[in-house]
Image: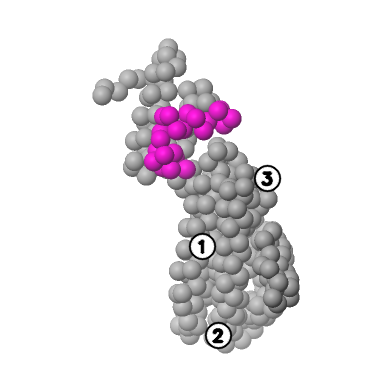
C-alpha cells in the first residue's frame, strides 16, 4: 500500500485510515507513546470517535487484539513531566542537604523526589487514557508493578560497605526510590478505583481484586522499605566513622544516620516522598477487614467482602 500525505483536504475516512495505519505500525514496533499520541490526534480531528462512542469503533476497527495493543500503548506511555517518576528535589535543589548538616526530609537526603503528577509511577496520568481503556490500563500497570516489586524484594539489600561508603548509601537510596515508584503505581490503582465509582458487577469485582492485590504487595514492600532504611542508617554511621573530625561530612553523616533511624520507626513517613496516604489508608482498611473477618468467622458463613 502506498502512503498518502495528510492534508487538510484528506477526506475524513482517508484520514482515519491513515492515522490507523500509522498507529498500528507504532503499536507493532512497541512505540507506545507514539501510538497513544496518534490515537489522541485521531480523536481531536474526529477521525476516531470521542470516548462515549469508542467501544464499538474499537471492536470494528482494531478488534480484540488491536484493542489490547492500544491499551498496552496507553499503559506504557511515560509521564510527560518526569523520567521514571523521579525529579530533582526543589526544596534542597537536588543536594539532599539543607545548610551544612541538615537532611532534606522531603527527599530523605537523596536529592531526588517523586514526581507530583504521576505520584512517582513514571506513567502518564489516567486522565489521558480513554475511559473505556482505563481499567485494562490500570490492570496492566498494577500487575507489572506487583511483579517488579516481588522481584525487588527478593533481591538482597545492598550490603553496608566501608569503601566508597557514599556510593553505597546512594545504591541503597536508589533501591528505596525504585520501591517507592512501584508503590506510587499501586497508590494510583487505589485512588483510580475509588474514582471509577460504581462499575458493572464483573468489572467492579475485577477492580476490587486489583486493590486487594495492590494492598497485599504494598504490605510486603513496606517491610522491604524499612529494612532498606535500616541499612541506610548503618551505612550513614559507617560514613560518619570514616569522616574527618569536626568536618561538615561528619556532621551530615551523623544527622543522616539519626534521621534514617528515626524513619525506620515512622508510622506514615509524613512530609517525605515515602508517604503514600491513600495507599496507607487502603492498607489499614484491609487489615481491619481481615481482623473483623477473623473475629466473626468462627463457624459463621464466610462474608462477601467489601
Ligand atoms: Zn531535598
Ligand atoms: Zn511523572
Marking on residue 198: 3
Q: What's the magenta region?
A: 50-71
Residue at the spot x=47%, y=58% of the render?
A: 144
Q: Which of 214 and 82 is in front in this view?
A: 214
Q: Name the quarter where the C terminus is drawn.
A: bottom right
Residue at the spot x=45%, y=17% of the render?
A: 12
Residue ID for mark 1: 146
Residue 176, image x, y percentages: 55, 69
Q: Name the quarter where the N terminus is drawn.
A: top left
Q: From this viewpoint, is residue 86 visible?
A: no
Mark 3 element type:
loop
Q: Earlier in the sequence, mark 2 or mark 3?
A: 3
**Circles 2, 3 touching at the beta carbon (< 8 Å):** no
**Whole-number angstrom distance, CA of label 2 to CA of label 3:** 53 Å
Residue 13, image x, y percentages: 42, 18
Prevailing SS of the magenta stretch: helix
Q: Earlier in the sequence, mark 1 or mark 2?
A: 1
Mark 1 element type:
helix
Between disc 1 and disc 2, the foreground one is 1
Q: Which of 250 and 43 is in front in this view?
A: 43
Between disc 3 and disc 1, the foreground one is 3
Marking on residue 238: 2
Residue at the spot x=71%, y=65% of the render?
A: 285
Q: In this view, does 224 lie above or below 133?
A: below
Residue at the spot x=47%, y=35% of the render?
A: 37
Within the magenta stretch, is there residue 67? yes
Tell me the quarter of the picture where residue 231 sits.
bottom right
**Whole-number angstrom distance, CA of label 1 to CA of label 2:** 33 Å
Mark 2 element type:
helix
Q: Which of 306 and 46 is in front in this view?
A: 306
Amino acid at each position: 500500500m502506498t502512503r498518502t500525505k495528510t492534508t487538510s483536504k484528506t477526506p475524513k475516512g482517508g484520514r482515519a485510515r491513515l492515522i490507523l495505519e500509522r498507529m498500528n505500525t507504532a503499536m507493532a514496533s512497541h512505540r507506545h507513546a507514539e501510538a497513544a499520541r496518534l490515537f489522541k490526534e485521531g480523536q481531536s480531528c474526529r477521525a476516531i470517535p470521542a470516548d462515549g462512542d469508542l467501544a464499538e469503533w474499537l471492536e470494528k476497527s482494531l478488534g480484540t487484539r488491536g484493542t489490547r495493543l492500544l491499551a498496552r500503548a496507553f499503559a506504557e506511555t511515560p509521564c510527560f513531566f518526569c523520567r521514571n517518576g523521579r525529579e530533582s528535589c526543589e526544596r534542597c535543589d537536588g543536594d539532599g542537604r539543607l545548610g551544612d548538616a541538615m537532611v532534606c526530609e522531603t527527599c530523605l537526603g537523596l536529592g531526588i523526589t517523586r514526581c507530583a503528577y504521576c505520584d512517582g509511577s513514571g506513567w502518564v496520568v489516567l486522565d489521558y487514557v480513554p475511559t473505556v481503556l482505563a481499567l485494562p490500563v490500570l490492570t496492566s500497570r498494577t500487575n507489572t508493578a506487583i511483579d517488579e516489586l516481588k522481584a525487588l524484594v527478593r533481591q538482597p539489600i545492598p550490603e553496608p560497605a566501608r569503601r566508597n561508603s557514599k556510593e553505597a548509601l546512594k545504591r541503597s537510596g536508589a533501591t528505596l526510590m525504585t520501591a517507592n515508584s512501584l508503590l506510587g503505581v499501586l497508590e494510583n490503582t487505589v485512588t483510580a478505583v475509588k474514582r471509577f465509582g460504581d462499575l458493572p458487577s464483573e468489572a467492579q469485582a475485577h477492580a476490587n481484586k486489583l486493590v486487594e492485590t495492590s494492598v497485599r504487595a504494598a504490605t510486603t514492600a513496606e517491610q522491604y522499605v524499612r529494612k532498606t532504611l535500616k541499612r541506610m542508617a548503618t551505612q550513614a554511621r559507617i560514613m560518619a566513622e570514616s569522616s574527618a573530625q569536626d568536618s561538615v561530612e561528619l556532621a551530615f553523616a551523623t544527622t543522616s544516620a539519626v534521621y534514617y533511624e528515626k524513619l525506620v520507626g515512622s508510622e506514615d513517613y509524613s512530609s517525605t516522598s515515602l508517604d503514600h496516604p491513600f495507599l496507607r489508608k487502603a492498607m489499614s482498611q484491609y487489615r481491619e477487614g481481615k481482623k473483623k473477618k477473623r473475629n466473626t468467622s468462627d463457624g459463621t458463613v464466610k462474608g462477601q467482602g467489601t
